[in-house]
Amino acid sequence: MMNNILLDSPQNIREFSDILHEVQEYISGKYALLISDDSERQKEQIKSYITKYLMDYSLAVEDLTLDELVEKLYSEMAEYSFLTKYLFRNDIEEININSWQDIKVTYSNGEILPIKEHFNSPKHAVDVMRRLLHKSGMILDHSQPIVVGHLSEKIRITVLGQGVIDPNMGVAVSIRIVNPKKLVKEDFIKHHTANEEMLEFLSLAHRYGESMCLTGATSSGKTTLMSWILSTLPDNKRIYTIENGTREFNLVKRNEKGEVINNIIHTVTRHSDDPKQNITMVKLLETGLTVNPDYICVAEMKSEEAFFAQEAARTGHGVTTTIHASSCIATYYRMVTLCKQRYDMDERTLYNLVTEAFPIVAFCKKLEDNSRHIMEITECEIKDDGTRNIRTLYKFNVTDNSMVDGKLKIIGEYEKVNDMSKSLQKRLLENGMPRNILQTFIGWSQKKSAARPCSLGGESNE
């Protein structure tokens, strides 16, 4: 078929940029005819006009079939240039643009590789980023050189433009793509993210009322783990989630008839230049307390919402959240720092508040071989005299590092360090945990309490 052969008339072979300019002018003259409420129909119309123009003037680009040229022109004009084919793949976590010529992709297996494509110029990079940001109503210009937006509920975009980077770089961009695959307990065990008992402990501790914080650096697996924990809550419990700007969670469950079978409210913040129209995480958290939730999820604590999150946790709601910190112990001091952004209270008082609010902390980490682990789970035990004792319940011990076929392998094993405190056992029983389930954690066999040594070599859980 004609569309699948190379158009190789020497006199009509042109540079792609030249053909793009011509076709853009041609299509702009047909714009009134292309307006349609049906996006798919409009897409086909645009492609048909592009095809007709190319064939009428026998235009071609070397090494491209007509179909390939039409797709490339359409993507450049109506979509997001060469980025389009990377944005909607399931095996990519992040696209990092360091300049218009330097683009790296982070894959789900942890590899970070450059791609062969790049923008045509700094201006071309800026134009494509403006097109991406337009979807979320954000504008990149001299007055706003730093913009955070989204393309969909699964794609977050942070753009740095002229004014904070050199003009000849075009833009610097981080595009975070949320893995659409919903992981189950077996996936975490398979990838050695944790062992069975650790996962059961986090799931059931939250199910029976304990608030917890998942901590670690960016891309350490916190959000993926939290999403799984929330998915294990009973369908009749009402869950209220709060996210900043872009929704990553999709906890809605449906039966085979498409009917919703659980009880979820997903919310996101809304930024506005008008303070009266600005909806912050604090506002959503305050609102959440009025809609009778059983569990509240604050996707990430970055600012003063930390104070309201700990208040919610101390008033009887089960709260899950994430935070950026370097260890379980450091998590509480990070919370104190964030809480002080709201009220300049004594640090010891705030420390006592946050340790009471979030007795369980799990520290997640992405290691050098790209494997992700729950490195430690701690419990903050509050003694009768009010003093705090941070107890390590579980941890991952690295026992060796080796190079195999040029790739680093980190070898380690999980260890159960302590049983939960008597006070935590008492709270879980009071909150409805059956004694026989509680007893499995106290008397969990040595075989299950420590996972087999794992030689990981770069496996990933996202």
Image (spheres, rainbow, N blue to C red):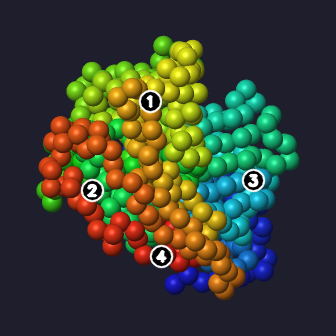
Amino acid type indicated by mark 3: Asn
Is residue 108 rendered to the left or right of residue 103? left
Name the mark on residue 387.
1
User: Residue drawn 61% across and 74% down?
Assistant: 400
Q: Distance between the residues labelled 4 and 3?
A: 38 Å
Could you tell me if the residues under marks 1 and 2 are in contact, i.e. CB atoms within 8 Å? no
Relative depth, front residue between 445 and 451: 445
Q: Name the residue under label 4.
A: 453
SS for tag 1? loop
Q: Which x, y percent locates residue 52?
A: 57, 65
Is residue 291 rendered to the left or right of residue 81? left
Is residue 245 rendered to the left or right of residue 383? right
Q: In which quarter of the image is residue 344?
A: top right
Q: Distance between the residues labelled 4 and 1?
A: 36 Å
Amino acid type indicated by mark 1: Thr
Q: Is residue 286 above or below residue 227?
A: above
Q: Which x, y percent locates residue 317?
A: 29, 31
